[in-house]
Image (spheres, rainbow, N blue to C red):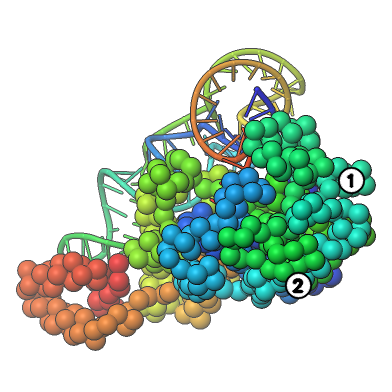
RNA sequence: GCUGGGGUGACAGAGCGGCUAAUGUGACCGCCUGCAGAGCGGUUUCCCGGGGGUUCGAUUCCCUCCCCCAGCUCCA
């Protein structure tokens, strides 16, 4: 079995072949940290988390880098306008680096909460100024960059003479020229050799706070540069997979690629597979603050189990434009409960002597692998897992060891999809022993056929999100 | 206008040349239960946007039309 991934470089699904036999090196474009993580960001990171986990599950040794951008990009045109980090910092009355520190800490907290904590390195742009300046110089030395008034541009026309550009996104430069009309400032047009050129290093105006000394004066890096530099530093001149949102297909990734090629001059593709994740809509519309359909991860975590959120992410395909809503989260919650109930009932099952689950386990391993190999078809994988849960549910006549093994397998495979599955939530609630006590009393009442009182206990508990279930083996409870 | 992605049962959402189209939710009936929950069994519902074509055969390929969504400026 081999994994097939949709490669934006060729616009087709391709068999994944790593550069080194057992190692996979992945770079994921992370977040510009001036604002809080929202569902859309998280959805994309979840896709790469699943990619990482799945490849690890298949036996690869995954080395995964995801950057954290802590130098603001600009608010309007590519190479002019205001720095977003500075703008956000000013609004919150913080130093830019103070804002960044705060946001980074928060980002980690939320990534951890969402069970996405397995990158090997999360490099930050501000920690790589020396390397970036060095890269700009190299690009100039190699003939693909030129300086104008303290700003250094990438010479796209020159690059295009020697290499394929933009390659990703398949755009032709004429389209770009049309698109640039009216949007690029006069100053910029007069400085640039051609309107397609983009900034490698930008001269800082006096009031600009985040700036660094360079051979071209005080300035700050262009927004494509950090990824090129940090990817090359930690993953080498050529690596396996580069991921990002669809919005990066153009212009960020072609520019990044061009920079890498201009830096090394080896002429090889710096990245073998470019993988992009579609954006989600919220309540059927593009997510935006003004439409009020903007959910931050923080908000969601207040009301939903992280496993529910991950269930939603795993239930959609990373390349399909999918819709997110609170209703869809409720649906995800029910799916998760179905799995939880499966484990829950196994816990209290005595088991029998049949061994039919052996075949089912073999079946699910194979099915899971083959659907995931097809460009990470997580929604289909999820339906297979639900089918497997159903098989377990009707196999309580299997011997206990086998039942436990099946439960472990279910947890393992859901884990590959980034979903932490807790068997039962007994005992993890404060005051759990008192609930047990109440149920003992209720048991007595039931034995004496005092059902009204017994039901009262059950009703009162359900008001507190404790679900009581009577089974032949006695009552048990779980959190809702 | 250009570039992508879609239109499948009550809903969500897979499948994409040939099992009476997965899975979940919902509804209904039954088993179990004092009742309920969970689970199980069954039922419910789609010939897959309209039209044309290719094929022995299409939801799945091609053409055309209609309708949605996203991108084309920073953006996951």
Residue that carries the numbered disc 1 in the rendered image: A158
Residue at (47, 61) in percent of width and height: A90
Residue B42 lies, with reference to residue A259, above or below; the image says above
Q: Quadrant of the N terminus of chain A?
A: bottom right
The span from disc 2 to disc 1 (Cα, nearest Å) is: 26 Å
Residue at (24, 71) in percent of width and height: A466
Q: Secondary structure at mark 1?
A: helix
Asked if residue A210 shows in the view, the reply is yes
From the top left corner, tell me how far across and down residue A322 is, in percent: 52, 46
Residue at (59, 46) in percent of width and height: A76
Front in this rendered view, residue A356 or A339:
A339
Q: Residue furthest front?
A: A206
Residue that carries the numbered disc 2 in the rendered image: A130
Residue at (68, 68) in percent of width and height: A212
Can you tell which quarter of the image residue A271 is in? bottom right
Instruction: Please tell me which of labels 2 and 1 falls first in the chain.
Output: 2
From the top left corner, tell me how far across and down residue A473 is, in percent: 29, 78
A163 relative to A418 in the view: left or right = right
């Amino acid at each position: 079995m081999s994994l097939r991934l949709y490669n934006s470089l060729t616009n087709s699904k391709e068999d994944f072949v790593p550069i080194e036999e057992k190692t996979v090196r992945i770079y994921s474009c992370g977040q510009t940290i001036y604002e809080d993580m929202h569902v859309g960001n998280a959805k994309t990171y979840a896709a790469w988390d699943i990619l990482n986990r799945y490849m690890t599950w298949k036996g690869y040794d995954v080395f995964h880098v995801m950057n954290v951008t802590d130098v603001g990009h600009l608010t309007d045109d590519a190479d002019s306008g205001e720095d977003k980090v500075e703008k956000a910092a000013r609004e919150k009355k913080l130093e830019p680096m103070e804002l960044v520190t705060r946001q980074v800490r928060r980002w980690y907290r939320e990534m951890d909460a969402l069970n996405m904590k397995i990158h090997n390195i999360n490099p930050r742009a501000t920690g790589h100024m020396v390397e970036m300046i060095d890269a700009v110089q190299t690009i100039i030395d190699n003939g693909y960059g030129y300086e104008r008034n303290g700003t250094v541009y990438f010479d796209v026309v020159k690059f295009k003479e020697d290499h394929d550009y933009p390659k990703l996104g398949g755009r032709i430069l004429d389209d770009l020229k049309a698109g640039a009309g009216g949007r690029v400032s006069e100053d910029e047009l007069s400085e640039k050799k051609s309107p397609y050129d983009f900034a490698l290093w930008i001269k800082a105006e006096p009031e600009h706070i985040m700036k660094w000394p360079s051979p071209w004066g005080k300035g700050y890096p262009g927004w494509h540069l950090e990824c090129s530099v940090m990817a090359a530093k930690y993953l080498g001149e050529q690596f396996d997979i580069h991921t990002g949102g669809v919005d990066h297909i153009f212009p960020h990734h072609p520019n990044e690629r061009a920079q890498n090629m201009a830096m090394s001059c080896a002429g090889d593709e710096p990245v073998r597979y470019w993988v992009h994740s579609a954006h989600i809509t919220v309540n059927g519309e593009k997510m935006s603050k003004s439409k009020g359909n903007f959910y931050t991860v923080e908000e969601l975590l207040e009301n939903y189990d992280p496993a529910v959120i991950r269930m939603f992410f795993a239930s959609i395909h990373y390349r399909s434009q999918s819709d997110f809503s609170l209703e869809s989260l409720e649906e995800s919650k029910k799916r998760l409960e179905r799995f939880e109930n499966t484990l829950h009932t196994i816990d209290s099952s005595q088991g029998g002597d049949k061994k039919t689950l052996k075949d089912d386990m073999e079946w699910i391993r194979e099915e899971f692998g083959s659907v995931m190999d097809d460009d990470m078809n997580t929604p289909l994988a999820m339906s297979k897992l639900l089918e497997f849960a159903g098989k377990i549910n009707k196999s309580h006549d299997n011997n206990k060891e086998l039942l436990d093994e099946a439960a472990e397998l279910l947890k393992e495979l859901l884990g590959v999809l980034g979903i932490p599955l807790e068997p039962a939530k007994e005992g993890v609630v404060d005051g759990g022993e008192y609930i047990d006590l109440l149920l003992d009393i209720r048991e007595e009442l039931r034995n004496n056929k005092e059902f009204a009182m017994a039901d009262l206990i059950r009703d009162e508990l359900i008001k507190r999100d404790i679900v009581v279930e009577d089974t032949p083996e006695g009552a048990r409870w779980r959190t809702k």
